[in-house]
Amino acid sequence: MTTQVVSSDAPPAVSPVLRTPPAAPAEAAAYFAARLAFHTDAADVHAALTGGGDPGFVLVDVRSTESWDQGHIAGALHLPTAGIPQHAAKLLDPAVPVVVHCWGPGCDGATRAAAALAERGYRVKEMLGGIEYWIREGHAVRTAQGREQHAPDPLTAPIGDGDCGC
C-alpha cells in the first residue's frame, strides 16, 4: 500500500468565483450605483406603469413595426431604432426620461437605441430582458386581437404575490 504525502507548502485551491477577487466595497458601490443609472427591469417598469399616476418616464419600444404588431406593452411609444434620428425630437420631450426596450437579453437593439437617444440629449435607461421578460413575468401585452397575458414563468418570476423581495 502506498501512502501519498501532501505538501503543506502547496497554495490553497482558489474557486473559479474568486480567481478574480471582488472589488473593494467603495469601488463596488460606485459600479452598482452607476449600473442602476443605466438599467431598470420589467418588474420595476410594470410597477411604475400600473401604480397610478405619472410614472415619470416614457416607455419606448424600439422594435420593428412587424414586431410591435406581434404584441407590445400598453402605453409604450413605438419608435424603431432606425427612426430615432428623424423622429425622436417630434415624439419625445427631452425633459422626460426615456426607458427603451427591444426583444430580450440576446438583443442589443435597446442598447443601440439608448445610445442614439443619449447622443441626442435624452436621459435614458434600458429595460433589461426586453419584452421577452415582460411576457415571461406574466405582464400583459396588446395585440391586434386585444389584450394578451400568459402565466408567469416560474423560472423567471416570483411565485405567489409577485414580490421577489428585492
Image (cartoon, helix red, strand yellow):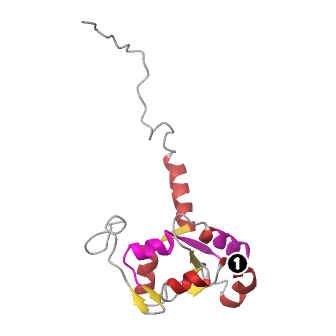
Q: Quadrant of the C terminus?
A: bottom left
Q: Position of residue 96 (x, y in %)?
A: 61, 83
Q: Is residue 22 left or right of residue 80?
A: left
Q: Is residue 32 left or right of residue 88?
A: left
Q: Quadrant of residue 31?
A: bottom right
Q: Is residue 9 visible?
A: yes
What residue sits 43% from the left and 32% below the top?
14
Amino acid type at circle 1 is Ala
Q: Position of residue 60 (x, y in %)?
A: 58, 81
- The residue that disc 1 covers is 82
Q: Is residue 72 visible?
A: no
Which residues are the magenta region? 112-140
Q: State whether residue 69 is above or below residue 19.
A: below
Q: Position of residue 83 (x, y in %)?
A: 70, 82
Q: Position of residue 111 (x, y in %)?
A: 62, 68
What residue sits 41% from the left and 90% below the top?
147
Q: Is residue 137 magenta?
A: yes
Q: Quadrant of residue 38?
A: bottom right
Q: Is residue 116 magenta?
A: yes
Q: Quadrant of the N terminus?
A: top left
